[in-house]
Amino acid sequence: MQEKGEIIVNVDGKEFKLAQDFIKFERQEKTVLEEKFIPAVIEPSFGIGRIIYCIYEHCFKIREKDA
């Protein structure tokens, strides 16, 4: 990068030249004290339907001659 002033990048058989004006390299040190995770989907599971479904799924069995 410092010698030529550009970087050549190949993506899907196409060649792109990135000039020194478009790229900035810098080294940083960051201290992370807490990392929070918020789920994207919250699925409440209450009601008799789910319990019955789980019982049916647990008891379901396929015999080899039926498959």
Image (cartoon, rainbow, N blue to C red):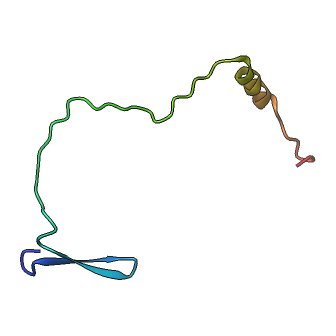
Query: In the visual, does 37 lie left or right of 42?
Result: left
For the image shown, how many numbered marks are present on the structure?
A: 0
Relative vertical location of residue 4 with respect to residue 35 in this rendering, above or below = below
Relative vertical location of residue 29 with respect to residue 6 in this rendering, above or below = above
Residue 2, horizontal then vertical, whole percent: 7, 74
Q: State the image quarter where residue 56 is shown.
A: top right
Relative vertical location of residue 6 with respect to residue 50 in this rendering, above or below = below
In the image, what residue occupies the spot 69% across and 17% down? 47
In the image, what residue occupies the spot 11% across and 70% down? 21
Which residue is more in the foreground, 52 or 38?
38
In the image, what residue occupies the spot 10% across and 81% down? 4
Q: State the image quarter where residue 12 is shown.
A: bottom left
Residue at the far front: name it: 21
Query: In the visual, does 67 lie left or right of 52?
Result: right
Residue 13, horizontal then vertical, whole percent: 38, 82
Residue 16, horizontal then vertical, whole percent: 27, 79
